[in-house]
Image (cartoon, grey):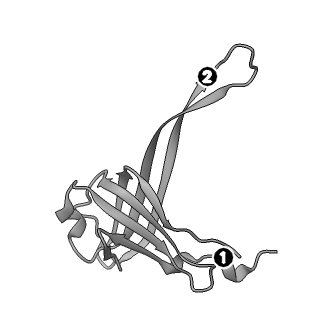
Amino acid sequence: MLDASRVILGTYGQAFIDGVWQTNINKLEASVELEKRELNLVGNDWKVHKTGIKKGTGTISGYKVTSDMIQRGFSKFDIISKLDDPESFGHERVLLMRCMPDKIQLANWTAGEEVQEETSFTFEGYQLLDPIVGD
């Protein structure tokens, strides 16, 4: 049976851009999509698949506290995602390599509200640095 205390909460997530902890970030999402080619082979009544190239995409968002993302422009950077819930079986760190913004948010504010900043990006590789392994 699942021990509910082992479920990881995003509250303990951290994002590091080029090694610098981004304390203003409250959401990070990244995924890899694999292109597959469908093949029809004689004597086979099943479609088979050949793997192709991969595409990494993600979004990082949080509160605006600096002009860092504007200053970076479209230069590439690395992101390390870290999940470290003290009740989990350990922590997980994933390196997203050669991230590049899709667009740069120059202004997005409303009087009386916190300014949120969201940057969608692509990346060109990943590495699982620290896996979480259950008991």
Q: Is residue 5 above or below residue 18?
A: below
Return the x and y of residue 50 as percentages of the image width and height: 57, 30
User: Mark 1 is on which residue type?
Assistant: Val
Return the x and y of residue 69 as percentages of the image width and height: 24, 65
Residue that protrudes farthest toward the bottom in the picture: 86
State which tag comes first along the sequence, 2 or 1: 1
Nearer the camera: disc 2 or disc 1: 2
Query: Label 1 near label 2: C-beta < 8 Å?
Result: no
Asked whether 68 or 83 is in front, the reply is 83
Answer with the quarter of the image where residue 86 lies. Answer: bottom right
C-alpha span from label 2 to label 1: 40 Å
Return the x and y of residue 36 as percentages of the image width and height: 55, 33
Asked whether 99 or 108 is in front, the reply is 99
Q: Residue at x 73, y 25 (%)?
A: 46
Q: Residue at x 20, y 70 (%)?
A: 67
Q: Is residue 122 left or right of residue 43?
A: left
> Residue tagged by mark 2?
39
Residue that protrudes farthest toward the right in the picture: 1
Asked whether 21 or 119 is in front, the reply is 21
Q: Is residue 86 above or below residue 66?
A: below
> Residue tagged by mark 1?
7
User: Mark 2 is on which residue type?
Assistant: Leu
